[in-house]
Amino acid sequence: MKRHFLILISVLFLLCGGCARTDAPASPTAESSPIVELLLADPTPSPTPMPTNTPIPDALNADSGQYTIAWISDTQYYSRKNNGVFECMTQFLRDNADRMRLAYIVHTGDLVHNRDVPEQWAVADRAMQIIDDLPNGVAAGNHDVGTKPEDCDYSYFSRYFGESRYAGKSWYGGSFEDNRGHFDLISAGNTEFLFVYLGYQVTQAGMDWARETFAAYPDRVGVLAVHDYFYHDLSLTEQGQLLYDNVVKPSKNLYLVMCGHRYNCDRVPVELDDDGDGVPDRTVLQMIANYQAIGDAAAAERTGGDGYIHFLQVDENADVIRYISYSPYMDDYVYFDEPAHQMEKYAFSAEGEQGQVPIPWPH
């Protein structure tokens, strides 16, 4: 019996005092009840998330109700150097056509630097083949056919970019003298376009053909694509004045003029009174885009424009054309936004590279 009593006392001790601190009395009393202490460490606070930049939508993405016209010009140094830039530009257009809703590609001339060098034509041909199945058109520049009137020769241009290259394309409308001039019919958004091209060294016969072509499609929005139209300062060149007087003014459905040749990227709107009542009836947006002279290197050492392409994103819902330049070769938007670039000999305004203007045609 005594043994059973001792066992019971031992069990009670373990139950009541076994969790107590080691310095507690051996025999628990009323004054010294066992205390259980639960020590909790302070919780470690979660690190404050670092702020993140809100993603900026790619300026070249086009939403519903928008479409893009891509514009290349004066690629002659790329063809002469065979440096891969020309191919980089056209490959970018092909690879990104869907997200840009790319409707059309314009090339306003000088595919090559030396018209009688087949190797340069091979480079231009190879680069343009990349976009052969995308709607596109090309005008001949002075380096493609000759600068002086008495030296003008379209034989090389027609061999590589004549009517035979485009015959059968769904957008190709027809040509004047084996693509010395030609026209394309393009549907984009709610607009039916008529792109008319005239190559360098315009003739009266060529201008008459262009004017008659615009007149034959009065319900289409007319665009004139040429090589030589503006000087650097945006005044009209001799050929530009001829084109303005013989094609732009009399063609009542012509709303855009696109050119290269000289060094600038800008636009000049002009209001025209078609019916002579003293009230403007239409605005023609005259534009130039040519990056071939960027950089301070001598002409022979220039890369030829670093692959910049000028983009016109037409937003019919907002009634604006947003324009911006981008180089897939440099992965850079807007070349002349850098202060150092503004010190270059042929610098032009960055405002001409990026901005927006009202759509000048009815839509």
Image: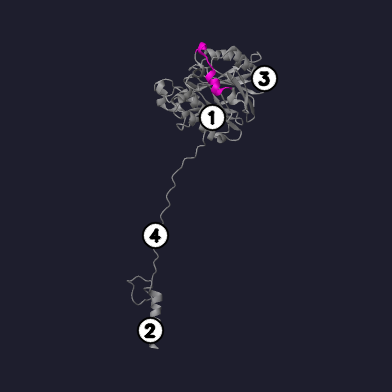
Above or below 74: residue 93: below
Foreground mark, 4 or 3, reads 3
**Chain-order first, disc 4 or disc 2:** 2
Which secondary structure, mark 2? helix
Q: What is the span of residues highlighted in magenta in the rendered image?
A: 148-162
Asked if residue 354 shows in the view, the reply is no
The x, y position of residue 194, in whole percent, is 62, 23
Spatial separation of the CA atoms under disc 4 and disc 3: 87 Å
Q: Return the mark for residue 6.
A: 2
Which secondary structure, mark 1? helix
Q: Return the mark for residue 129.
A: 1
Spatial separation of the CA atoms under disc 1 and disc 2: 104 Å
The C terminus lies in quadrant: top right
In the drawing, does residue 304 fall left or right of residue 171?
Answer: left
**Chain-order first, disc 1 or disc 2:** 2
Foreground mark, 2 or 3, reads 3
Which secondary structure, mark 4? loop
The x, y position of residue 28, in whole percent, is 36, 76
Spatial separation of the CA atoms under disc 2 and disc 3: 121 Å
